[in-house]
Amino acid sequence: MGTPASPAPLEPTPSQTVGPFYGYALPFTGGEELAPVGHPGTITVHGYVYDGAGAPVPDALVEIWQADEAGSLKGAPGSLRRDPVTGGILGRNGVDFTGFARIATDASGRWFVRTLPPGPHRDGAVPYLSVCVFARGLLHHLFTRIHLPEHAAALAADPAFGELSEARRQTLVAVEERPGVYRFDIRLQGGAGEETVFLDFA
């Protein structure tokens, strides 16, 4: 019996881009309803995902991870309700704050989340909503943050972000359109607009 031949070296293959995503896959009913129904003090954050040409991206996926109002990152697992017959997801239980939302952009590239204002997760931390973006054309998902305008001064004083130019730093700050409603657009590339600051986690 001879020695098995060594396998031929594998050739590298082209990287695959992320997305598009289909309605029956990752998104789920109530994915944008992060705050429990009827909870006082909820806020709505909405915006558009734009590509480098300034065109809206209709099939991106936005994930939100955040602390609750007290700064707790524990969340509440198991809030999804399933159909006992089909096993399909019916939505959230409407009671627990999980700290996680997943939203697909609509045909116009718009997304929104109804949530609670995040608290500082430790002493001296600037509160934020952590964002993960998946979209076609990307080789990897992107991370960024949403800071509310009331935290803009603290963000400017943060050593990690204080060295950014004012214009670049403002891409991390939502705009308050009216009490409780904030707009945060995500620009995947520069060109037609200022590219959102994305974060690299080593």
Image (tube, rainbow, N blue to C red):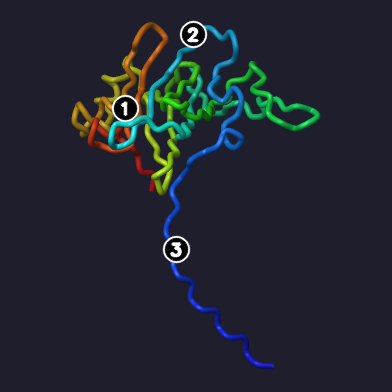
Q: Residue at x 66, y 26 (%)?
A: 80
Whether pointer 2 and pointer 1 mark residues with C-beta atoms closer than 8 Å, the reply is no
Mark 3: amino acid: Thr
Q: Is residue 26 above or below residue 90?
A: below
Circle 1 is placed at which residue position? 172
- x, y (%) of residue 40? 53, 7
- 2 or 1: tag closer to the N-terminus: 2
Marks 3/2: CA distance?
A: 50 Å
Mark 2: amino acid: Gly
Mark 1: amino acid: Leu
Residue at the left extreme, as displayed: 165
- x, y (%) of residue 29? 61, 25
Q: Quadrant of residue 129?
A: top left
Q: Tag 1's secondary structure?
A: loop
The crowding category of the residue bearing disc 1, from other C-alpha atoms within 10 Å (few below 14, some 14 to 19, many at least 20), is many
Please identify the quadrant where the N terminus is shown.
bottom right
Toward the viewer: 105 or 130?
Answer: 105
Residue at the front extreme, as displayed: 107
Toward the viewer: 148 or 184?
Answer: 184
Marks 1/3: CA distance?
A: 35 Å
Q: Is residue 78 left or right of residue 144?
A: right
The crowding category of the residue bearing disc 2, from other C-alpha atoms within 10 Å (few below 14, some 14 to 19, many at least 20), is few
Circle 3 is placed at which residue position? 13
Q: Tag 2's secondary structure?
A: loop
Q: Tag 3's secondary structure?
A: loop
Residue 54 - label: none
Q: Residue at x 36, y 30 (%)?
A: 56
- 1 or 3: tag closer to the N-terminus: 3
Residue at the bottom extreme, as displayed: 1
Q: Is residue 65 left or right of residue 162?
A: right
Q: Residue at x 43, y 56 (%)?
A: 15
Circle 2 is placed at which residue position? 41
